[in-house]
């Protein structure tokens, strides 16, 4: 089944594979930027995305490349599998949130949603919650990855090399 996403791999394995291919895992900001792009099909497609997030990942997630598409032409960010990102644990806060000062309270539990610019986009919160529950050795049938091209280096003037 060469047309299925690679799943049941840890972050360590996904990262090693990407490096072996001369690629990398996207970071959270890159992944979320791509995922926030307008979806082909608009509101109807967004409802499909919400439905996917509301149910467990099926045993056979389906083939890659034919799923939900953004207007930028990126497919399968939604509705196929959860995906590793390079900095998946960057949003994890340490400490005990119950004893946190008011200044720190926004780092824990759902309090981070208070200042969200798009609170109706609960699927983004679902992704952050999923990532924060993972450890680098975690695996699962619904957890895969995609490779990203290395970032282009910039000349001192800011122009691409």
Image: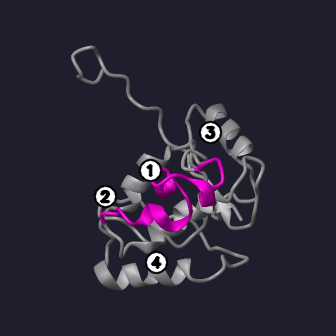
Q: Quadrant of the N terminus?
A: bottom right
Residue at 72% x, 46% y is 136
Whether residue 26 appears in this view of the structure is yes
| Vertical comparison of 16 with 141: above or below | above
From the image, state whether disc 1 or disc 3 is nearer to you: 1
Residue at 50% x, 44% y is 26
Q: Which residue is mark 1?
A: 103
Find out whether the residues at labels 2 and 4 contact each other: C-beta distance under 8 Å: no
Residue at 61% x, 56% y is 99
Image position of 70 (left or right of 127): left
Among numbered discs 1 and 2, the one appearing first in the sequence:
2
Looking at the rendered structure, the secondary structure element under dot 4 is: helix
Question: Residue 12: which quarter of the image?
Answer: top right
The Cα atoms of the two marked residues, 1 and 3, are separated by 38 Å
Among numbered discs 2 and 4, the one appearing first in the sequence:
4
Looking at the rendered structure, the secondary structure element under dot 3 is: helix
From the image, state whether disc 1 or disc 2 is nearer to you: 1
Q: Which residue is mark 3?
A: 18
Image position of 104 (left or right of 153): right
Q: Which residue is mark 2?
A: 72
The Cα atoms of the two marked residues, 4 and 1, are separated by 34 Å
Read off the magenta span.
92-117
Image position of 155 (left or right of 34): left
Among numbered discs 3 and 4, the one appearing first in the sequence:
3
Picture coordinates of residue 145 (x, y %)? Answer: 61, 53
């Amino acid at each position: 089944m060469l047309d299925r996403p690679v799943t049941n791999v840890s972050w360590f394995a996904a990262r090693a594979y990407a490096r072996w291919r001369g690629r990398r895992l996207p970071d959270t900001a890159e992944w979320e930027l791509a995922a926030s792009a307008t979806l082909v099909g608009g509101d109807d497609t967004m409802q499909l995305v919400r439905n996917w997030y509301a149910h467990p990942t099926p045993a056979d997630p389906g083939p890659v490349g034919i799923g939900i598409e953004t207007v930028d032409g990126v497919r399968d960010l939604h509705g196929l599998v959860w995906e590793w990102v390079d900095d998946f644990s960057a949003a994890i806060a340490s400490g005990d949130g119950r004893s946190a000062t008011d200044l720190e309270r926004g780092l824990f539990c759902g309090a981070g949603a208070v200042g969200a610019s798009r609170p109706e986009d609960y699927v983004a919160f679902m992704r952050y919650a999923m990532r924060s529950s993972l450890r680098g050795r975690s695996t699962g049938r619904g957890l895969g990855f995609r490779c990203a091209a290395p970032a282009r280096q910039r000349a001192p003037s800011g122009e691409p090399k």
